[in-house]
Amino acid sequence: MASEAPAAGADGTALQVLRRLESGPRGLTDAEAAARLAATGDNTPPAARPVSWPRLLLRGTRDPFTAVLLVLGLVSALVASWGTAAVILALVAVGVALRASGEHRADRSLAGLRELVAGTATVLRRPADAEPPRPRELPVADLVPGDVIRLGPGDLVPADVRLLRARGLTVHQAALTGESAPVAKSATQTPDPAAESHLCFQGADIASGSATAVVLATGARTRIAAAPDGTGRREASAFDRSVHGISWVLIRFMLLTPPLVLMANAALRGRGLETLPFAVAVAVGLTPEMLPVIVTTCLARGAVLLARTHGVIVKRLPALHDLGAIDVLCVDKTGTLTQDRPVVDRSLGPDGHDDPTALHWAAVNAWWTLQLAELPQPDSLDEALLEAAAPAEAYDAVDAVPYDPVRRLATAVLRDPRPGTHTLVVKGAVEDVLDRCSLAEGERDRLAALARREADSGLRLLAVATARRPARTRPYTPADERGLTFRGLVTFRDTLAPEAAETLRGLLGQGVAVRVLTGDHPGTATRVCRELGWEPERVTVGADAASGPEPAVRGLTVHARCTPADKARVVEELRAAGHTVGFLGDGVNDAPALRAADVGIAPRSACAVARECADVVLGEKDLAAVGHAVTAGRHSGGNIASYLRVTLSSNLGNVLAMLTAGLLLPFLPMLPAQVLVQNLCFDAAQLAFAYDRPGAAALRRPAELRPRSFLRFLTGFGALNAVADLATFGVLALALHGPDAVDDEAVFHSAWFTENLLTQALVMVLLRTGRGAAGTGPVGRAAAVLGAVGLLLPPSPLGARLGMTPLPLPYYLLVTVVLGLYALALRRGARGALCTDPSGCTVAQHSNHC
């Protein structure tokens, strides 16, 4: 089995494994790697490969509306209504083909976009056998068995590997084992083969420490590729939940319609099974067949445009809608509200006065931790220390315990000038350093008060301490960080991000509350918010950030001293309270919150695990890019909402009118084929919504699809549409007499067909998101074509084949008057319905008249 291969091939010492793989500690040559890549294929998981056309077509038939249409077509065929069955199957074929082609284009676009953020790995390769190895950043897809790679904090394990060397290594491997806590790994194989502590598997992420490893398996032969599909399945997005909620309500209506029509006609008119094709056609009329096509097209076009214009990559299409729907955005402070380049402000001794000693030891720690822990690059505070202090290379270091976000410390171990002695240099969060220092109680309180005073002024702090230990050869661990001597504090100041204030104002003005989740001191975060022009409405610290009742979400809130678990809990509680939450993060400690959010957002420069967890990848880490992404999401969401409102209200009104007329007339109000052709014309015209651009009103509120709000809207406007249909023929019945009277079946069918398409064209124009009838655009042009079809099809040869006939001139004059009154009623009704209940409506229901 593929899942067993890595473990079996990894038995034995590291040298034995390298020999079996025909590799060595210096890695492969370029020629060897090229030959193995040709033999094994790209290191690409099966799920990331293109979907074939047959699978795309099959996937299109699994849509609930398509399945119902297929059932209705089968019923029509069983009762020998071949025309109705043929039209229904044509609708299914067109819908499935359009959806498959749209998804194919989206897959191709997204595949190209993913290449921009494709993961890389640090690989040891040699140009030739006699030359020394050189570390290179290569695409993960180019890895082959036998490659020697380096891993550091924040990296994703790119393949199944056997560790050759490891230092303080812990990994998250929940995708395979379900273990939520990091798991310690070492290069030494334990006696228990089930422990697999010497192995790391593709998809795991490095929590702390560093390692060198040899690749055992790639692509489809990795452990995660052989795991069940459900291990990494993501919870349904807010968009999926909303659309499915609306869909199943409509499907229930569709399934109830044919039995009701049959029973009513049998009871009142004595017509039984002969009305079945009409009943099926009416049920089809309720179906928004183009919903999958329009949704896919809207989201794919928005994603591609966003990538081209702003460098923002949407990895999961429904995430674009969820971006427009977010009403809470959680962000880190550093690199988002401020530039990720802090500057050293002061170096303070234990007495609170300026003293360069603390800065000196902090820089020594930063330099040697970076060197010995094999970190990929220094963090922003370490960079500031190394820029501000004298070079630290003069010391001879022997070991390092790298920083991790739980213990919040980093330790470098130096060889002391005194023989047989080592010096530990520890830097980190003030509370954690003080907890490990040997201090009298009064001295501890005094130093804590000094730190609070500096932090309350809005400065960031690092504490520094040292200790001497007898020299030893075994590695140092966090347990050695005790009995320290406090050396002082280093303070840092932040500089604001250039566009943060303006973008923050725009987001808050668009109804998006902002939560600042940071590990910094509350005074530091509060100072930054004030400098940006906003007073935080609430400030919490530590565990209080994710406990207690959730207050009303609005404005800007600060959660300081957050651990990774605190960030994830804040996101989960906001979602549980019914909010759509976005989270912007870039570190390995942000991964849990990125997974928990409706939309995880990471910059392209983020660590590999954060980028992999994210649904959206930004070209740069700044709020301006998030603002552009939210705007694009609201445009796409507005178009989808427009389509749903227009098609569902119009369809519901037509169905109600047909059911009522069917009970009042001695003949069917419209032939089944006529119902289906009308429905096909309306569906084709509504494809224009995928290319529309909503007005400014669509940006004022989160564009969330709320099923209950939609159903209230549809009930009101569906009834209004039905009244307009019935009123049209009431007026015509009184006004037209003689051979052109509407009691003639062909005249009635033709008149209703024309009136239906004209009213549907009006609905398309008047219920557009945020624009009303302003502007033409693709929707206006499609509505004009739809109206022209309604006027020209009945007198045409095709109309005659469908059982229709030319209409008398007085009909057009009367229908113009009726449609004018309908447009006024629709306009007034829309204005009242859309403005009286802003809290319960979607943004798509707020026109520019509100």
Image (cartoon, rainbow, N blue to C red):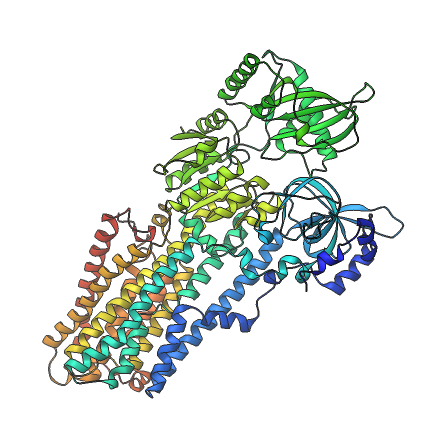
**Residue 66: which quarter of the image?**
bottom left
Across and down, in percent, residue 581 comes to 43, 45
665 relative position to 484: left or right: left
Comparing 770 with 375, the one in front is 375
The quadrant in which residue 466 appears is top right
363 in relation to 702, above or below: above
Please tell me which residue is depicted at 29% across the width and 55% down the height of the picture: 708
Q: Position of residue 451 (x, y in %)?
A: 54, 19
The answer to whether 483 appears left or right of 827 in the picture is right
Rendered image quadrant of residue 821:
bottom left
Image position of 511 (left or right of 189): left
177 left or right of 719? right
Taking depth in this image into account, of 441 and 125 the one nearest to the observer is 441
As drawn, the residue found furthest toward the bottom would be 80
The answer to whether one can see residue 685 in this image is yes
Quick check: can you spot residue 773?
Answer: no
For this rendering, which residue is in front, 68 or 545?
545
Q: Would you place residue 809 above or below residue 628 in this image?
A: below
| x and y percentages locating residue 687 in the rendered image | 40, 66
Residue 304 pos. (x, y %): 52, 56
In this view, which residue lies farthest toward the front? 191
The N terminus - image quarter:
bottom right
- Position of 408 relative to 590 (above/below): above
